[in-house]
Image: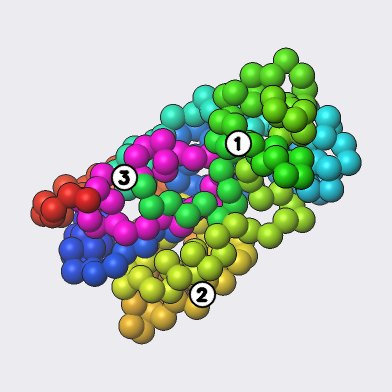
Amino acid sequence: MQNNINQIAALMANSRSTTVVTGAGISTEAGIPDFRGPEGIYRKLGEDKVMRIINIDTFRQRPELFYEFYREHFKLAEVAPGRAHYVLAELEARNYIHGVVTQNIDGLHQKAGSKNVIPVHGTADRFVCQKYHCGAVYDASTALSSPELVPRCEKCGGVLKPDVVLFGESIQNFMDAQDSILSAQLLIVIGSSLTVYPLAGFVRAFDSFTQDLVILNKGPTSMDHAARVKIDAPGTTGAVLEQIAALLPERGRA
């Protein structure tokens, strides 16, 4: 593995523009189960049931059902970033990483200090009033501290919605994510098997002939064949990133 770590450090040192794409695997080290993993809610409750409840139609028509499920299974405010999140924030501050595109809604990159984060599925840290012409924004702790099952806007009484992409909605920041991935000289994928679209499609459009692809993931991905370096990193992503960071010389901080 050490040769691969050395190679990744060399690629980062020589890259003019590095984008990191993260999936659920980076947050499992922080204690958040992967939806599709052995401890995930897809396995425990069934994918069809989850997709029916975490759906924009259910939210609009039966918000009490939505929030009963959400409050039980999405206790993200209590979770702290893992080692990998902190190292990525450090590497951004040292000008080695220029953007993070994440599939995760947990907000852990932002909590760790990363500034240039594109959350394509939104962030559970924010709640937005759904009443027309209001759109008031609340942080998650304020919204979820409501004694009512369904949190409501203090200004107009409208229902609050977590600022995340539910089934039946379009992803956020589509063009920003695409541009960040396709314009990168070096693309590092962490904790994603690259099966969820459209993000997987962006990575597949990445030109591995003129750009470098690095993958850190537990198990195979759909793009292993195109990767310059692949590290199978079950539960050790933070440690791997720390070793890479230690090999990189100091640059002017952002």
Within-10-Å neighbours for mark 2: few <14, some 14–19, many 20+: some
For the residues marked 2 and 1, what is the alpha-carbon distance in whole angstroms? 35 Å
Q: Position of residue 70 (x, y in %)?
A: 71, 32
Q: Which residue is mark 2?
A: 204
Q: Is residue 47 left or right of residue 186?
A: right
Question: Amino acid type of disc 3?
Answer: Ala
Q: Nearer the viewer, residue 157 or 30?
A: 157
Q: Position of residue 21 (x, y in %)?
A: 44, 58
The residue at which mark 1 appears reads as 137
The span shown in magenta is 90-114
Q: Position of residue 10 (x, y in %)?
A: 18, 65
Residue 89 marker: 3
Numbered tag placed on residue 62 in the rendering: none
Give the camera-side residue of 72 and 180: 180
* SS at circle 3: helix
Estimate the spatial distance between the alpha carbons at disc 1 and disc 3, rounded to whole Å.
25 Å
Q: Answer yes or no: is residue 201 visible.
A: yes
Q: Residue at x 41, y 55 (%)?
A: 100
| Rendering colour mode | rainbow
